Image (cartoon, rainbow, N blue to C red):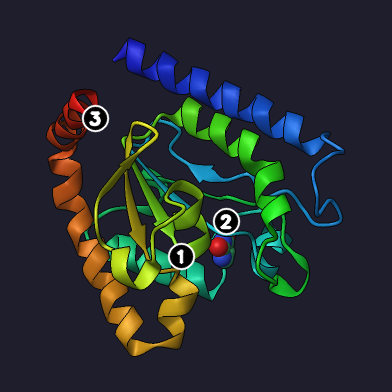
Amino acid sequence: MQQEASKKTDKEELLRRLEEQMAVDNTLPLREANLVFGEGDPDAPIIFIGEAPGFNEDRLKRPFVGRGGQLLNEAIASIGWKREDGYITNIVKRRPPENRDPLPEEISAYRPYLTRQIAIINPKIVVTLGRFAMNYFLPHAKISQDQGKIFFADNRLIVPIYHPAAALRSTQVLEEFFKSFKKLPKILKKVDELLRRARSKLASN
Ligand code: URA
């Protein structure tokens, strides 16, 4: 118990330092916007990764707090989980103007920080929300074809799911979005076995 607590405190401290480093990194793009670093349990087995902050996220400096965030909260609650038991962040940590899509060079600029953030948290499962976060880990995947499936990359399970904003625009996407969330508790329950199989398959190739 004692050991668990100190592990969590260490992670909190490492994340705090990483956020400080990002805040003073003048080479990062979109510096006119606020830094939205991420939030949640640093020891979570699951991390949810979106695209980039929007208007409300920029204002409150918290990820997924607008309408999309409400839907994400609903989806998390629908499987009996709590938002604060996971960790939530984005591939790009500042809002692009007018909520435009993040540019490839913006995604690349923020990549080293997300890599370190994920390494500190060390989750077993990465749930990507939307096409941009999915393609960050799985460059060749197609959202309509691959969302809801389980992949293995960077030594973790990757589960792409539609972006909540896309689910708000289409009832069919909304259905798929909730359906994919429903798979997560089972995936989490079997995660060690799934990782073991994926690693041994990789080793035998
Ligand atoms: N959309 C995202 O991708 N991330 C947020 O934090 C909010 C909206």
Mark 1 or 2, nearer chain start: 2
Q: Residues within 10 Å of mark 2 (few under 14, many from 20)?
A: many
Q: Give the labeled residue for mark 2.
A: 63
Residue shown at 20% from the left, 43% from the top: 188
Q: Can you say which quadrant of the picture contains the N terminus? A: top left
Q: Is mark 2 within 8 Å of ligand 1?
A: yes
Where is mark 3, residue-wise? 202
Residue at position x 71%, y 43% from top?
109
Q: Residue furthest front?
A: 205
Q: Nearer the viewer, mark 1 or mark 2?
A: 1
The circle drawn on residue 11 is none
**What kind of element bears circle 2?**
loop
Kind of residue at badge 3: Leu
- Find numbered disc 1 in the image and state the secondary structure of the residue it sits on: loop
Amino acid type of the residue tagged 1 in the rendering:
Gly
- Ligand 1 is found in the corner quadrant, namely bottom right
Q: How many marks?
A: 3
Q: Tell me if residue 88 can be seen.
A: no
